[in-house]
């Protein structure tokens, strides 16, 4: 769904505008997607590095669920390299050189359970550019929809 295999086991990622062409055993620009034998793998699924309850007014939304809180999550990695990023400590981490960043084994069900436990009205994919953990966010969103949550990034 998110990539195609090209000649010589190179994969082209279609997740973001960079459209990375990734050679076997190499990583995309985001640092969290790797070509393994002609298959593009995400290395951050269910590895939240940040999970916090934030006031919704911190998000770039106007008059949306005013005075509520949102359960905010992120993984490491980002497809941007912004010099002004306030979250660079997590967004610029990469699986290229690191193992074990993030809290392993935080499945989507746990994210929604935490959001419910904290009585938030929404779940936000934030702190990094959330397309890089698309599968994780997508699975969280499917569960949240069943729970009548609002999801946004």
Image (tube, grey):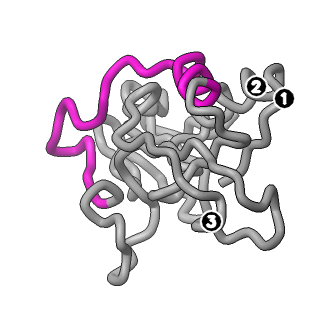
CA–CA distance in space, label 3 to label 2: 22 Å
139 and 54: which is toward the camera? 54
Which residues, given as a range, are shown in magenta? 92-116
Residue drawn at x 43%, y 40% as measured from the top left: 51
Q: Counting residues from the N terminus, which is met first, the one under dot 3 or under dot 2?
A: 3
3 sits to left or right of 92: right
Q: Which mark is residue 59?
A: 3
Residue drawn at x 79%, y 22% as measured from the top left: 147
Residue drawn at x 52%, y 19% as measured from the top left: 110
Disc number lying in front (1 or 2): 1
Which element type, helix, strand or loop, lies under badge 3? Answer: loop
Mark 2, residue position = 142
Which element type, helix, strand or loop, lies under badge 1? Answer: loop
116 and 86: which is toward the camera? 116
Mark 1, residue position = 148
| Position of residue 22 measured from the top left corner of the image (x, y, whole percent) | 41, 47
| Position of residue 93 measured from the top left corner of the image (x, y, whole percent) | 26, 53
Residue 41, magenta (yes or no): no
Question: What secondary structure is the magenta-colored segment mainly?
Answer: loop
């Amino acid at each position: 769904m998110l990539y195609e295999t090209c000649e010589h086991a190179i994969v082209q990622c279609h997740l973001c505008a960079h459209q990375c062409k990734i050679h076997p055993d190499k990583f995309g620009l985001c640092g969290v997607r790797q070509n393994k034998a002609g298959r593009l793998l995400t290395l951050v699924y269910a590895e939240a590095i940040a999970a916090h309850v934030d006031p919704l007014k911190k998000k770039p939304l106007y008059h949306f669920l005013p005075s509520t809180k949102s359960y905010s999550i992120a993984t490491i990695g980002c497809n941007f390299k912004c010099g002004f990023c306030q979250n660079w400590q997590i967004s610029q981490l990469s699986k290229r050189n690191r193992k074990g960043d993030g809290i392993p084994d935080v499945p989507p069900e746990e994210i929604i359970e935490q959001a419910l436990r904290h009585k938030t009205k929404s779940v936000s994919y934030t702190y990094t550019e959330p397309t890089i953990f698309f599968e994780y966010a997508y699975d969280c969103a499917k569960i949240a929809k069943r729970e009548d949550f609002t999801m946004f990034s």
